[in-house]
Image: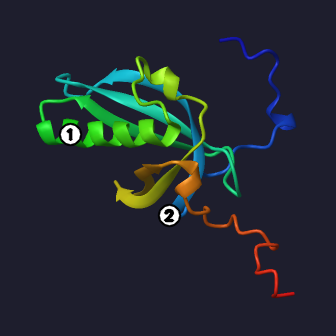
Amino acid sequence: MQLNNFDANTVQPAGEFTALPEGTYVVCITDSEERETKSGNGHYLQMTLEVIDGDFEGRLLWARLNLDNPSAKAVQIAKGQLSAICRAVEVMIPQDSSELHDIPLCVKVKQREYEGTMRNEVAAFKPVSTAEKAPGNVSVNDSAPWAK
């Protein structure tokens, strides 16, 4: 890949990424692809979700749906997650995962430790209309009208 005269002196270095605070975020699915499991005996749907609102706008999250796995429980969980996604974006019978892209939905994000580092895990998918605001998204104008 050509770097086209890239000059690191003119670009601020990227900072350290930390896990998002636990909460509910408005996101869009921006990418999805089928991948083979590390063990080679199944496949999962890898989805990239981008936060589209609030203090963490532009941050990415990932969800893995084990739709083809020797574990019937893993497949059952993945199908339930896919059903929740479909309901959240109102695409009930998708023929391809790309049909779920670029439609706002809300995700409940939790943190969990993995190999000594805090990571995010998408715990739930909801329609935008039923979701809570993400942490840090409360506007100063969110007070009750009588509280001036």
Q: Dot 1: few (<14), some (14–19), or many (≥20) neighbours within 10 Å?
A: some
Tell me if I can see residue 19 in this picture.
no
Q: Earlier in the sequence, mark 1 or mark 2?
A: 2
Q: Nearer the viewer, residue 16 or 142?
A: 142
Q: Nearer the viewer, residue 94 or 118?
A: 94
| Three-letter amino acid code at the position of disc 1 | Gln
Q: Mark 1 sits on what residue?
A: 76
- Residue appearing at x 27%, y 33% in the figure: 66
In the shown orientation, is residue 95 left or right of residue 141? left
Image quadrant in which the C terminus is located: bottom right
Tag count in the figure? 2
**Image location (x, y in percent) of residue 33:** 43, 22
Of all residues, the one furthest to the top in this rendering is 2
> Does residue 131 sit above or below 36 in this rendering?
below
Residue identifier under label 2:
22
* Circle 1 SS class: helix
Front: mark 1 or 2: 1
Q: Quadrant of residue 77?
A: top left
